[in-house]
Image (spheres, rainbow, N blue to C red):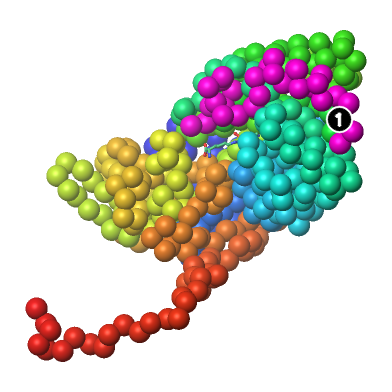
Amino acid sequence: MTPLGEGADAPRSGFERIAGALTCRGVSLEEAAGEFGTPLYLYDAEGVAERVRRFQVTFREISFLPAYSVKANGSLAILNRIAALGAGADIVSQGELERALRAGFPPERIVFAGVGKGEEEMVAGLRAGIYAFHVESAGELDLLSRVARDEGRVAPVGLRVNPDVESPTPHAYTRTGHAASKFGIPVEEAEALYVERRNDPHLEFLGIDAHIGSQIMETEPYLRAFHVVLGMLDRLREGGIDLAYLDLGGGFGVGYDGEEGLDLEDLAREIVPPIRERGLQLILEPGRAVVGESGVLLTRVRYLKRAGVKTFVITDAGMTELIRPSHYEGFHRILPVRETEGAPRVIADVVGPICESGDFLARDREMSLPQPGELLAVKTAGAYGFTMASNYNARPRPAEVMVEGGEVHLIRRRETLDDLMRGEEIPHPREAPGPLKPSECP
Ligand code: LLP
């Protein structure tokens, strides 16, 4: 471990400290922040590509579709690079469908999940010719069949099953595979649906899907879900319903504190043989594992403040840029972009400018005390960073840049004040009264 805690993962993640200053593949983060301003999301395109390839290589012995989960990071440039590697996309809305198509994903590599798909979204998916809808309730299946009939099409379907396994994710909000979750259809009900609806001329059952949660570090919960789904698939096959693919969802954990992420090879060792034996296609839907470690959020310190026993480092980024610390108690390393010799070690809260007590990037964090004006890098922010950013407090969302081939490219400009008010109208605008008269002054 270096004193600043980058740990041994620094080169692996594409971010490295050279002569005291953090860089991404040789590009200075200080220069990028100087040119594009802060807060700024910066991504390592090469790192993203490496991680997609890692999935492809690990599962090369079988028919495999990595369907990147667009919700993790849906910026067009990032999507384009992932699509260009032959990956597919996992989407949950018409907006994500449009993004995926515009970025270049072939529709036949797109799967569409989500518990509450609307009719328009079904129409859009059908017209685009996506690979499959992942249907999460009997009601949704009914509607999809009707919409497909009206469109004169057959809807490709995989039922999303709830395998009822507990998944040890760091926060309850990211667990989805247990019976009490709103996601998926209980196994017995799903099995019955495949049988009852097999002759519906507007549905074509292609596969089966499960997703048990996010930021899972162990293979064991996946294996439990896998065996539930595989058992179902075998029973259906015996009954003459031959499904082509098995989708185990996403959720593969990454090391937010320098630790190793989920061991994909270990997972592959267990699941590849039964899949190969059955001649099935495997779909996985990694989001975070593709983009998480390849992004940082750059933020500048505005003020230091001491209140009672607390030290606050007040930065120009907060929960509007990165909501994970506040919403999931998510941990992100925060590093000075340039090391300062002799900076005292303190325990501080790193907080943003937003008017909420829940607005923080870190709490009670041991760190080198930075000075106002200093640049900090919030690590492992490539997933669920920008995509969950908001305009709360009327804050423009930050710019995004991508490092590729030793250069920094702007991939999304910072929002302007006009962007903030786009689409709003004041019916019959009224004027405010003129200045207060002296007699009206308190
Ligand atoms: N497939 C489905 C059906 C999903 O619901 C998700 C994530 C994924 C794939 C991708 O999961 P990943 O590989 O990225 O873990 N905002 C939270 C995570 C929410 C995940 C929602 N679903 C966070 O920042 O931790």
Residue 10 seen by the camera: yes
Q: Nearer the viewer, residue 35 or 115?
A: 115
Q: Quadrant of ligand 1?
A: top right
Q: Nearer the viewer, residue 85 or 431?
A: 431
From the viewer's perspective, is residue 186 above or below residue 114?
A: above
Residue 296 picture location, percent across and down: 52, 48
**Label 1 neighbour load within 10 Å: few <14, some 14-19, many 20+:** few
Residue annotated with mark 1: 200
Magenta stretch encompasses residue 34: no
Amino acid at dot 1: Asp
* Residue depicted at x 46% and y 27%: 172
Residue 20 picture location, percent across and down: 45, 50
Where does the magenta region start and end? Answer: 173-202
From the viewer's perspective, is residue 290 above or below residue 387?
A: above
Residue 328 picture location, percent across and down: 44, 36
From the viewer's perspective, is residue 258 above or below residue 100?
A: above
* Residue depicted at x 60% and y 38%: 288
| Relative to 355, 81 lies left or right | right
Q: Secondary structure at mark 1?
A: loop
* Residue depicted at x 50% and y 74%: 425
Residue 253 seen by the camera: no
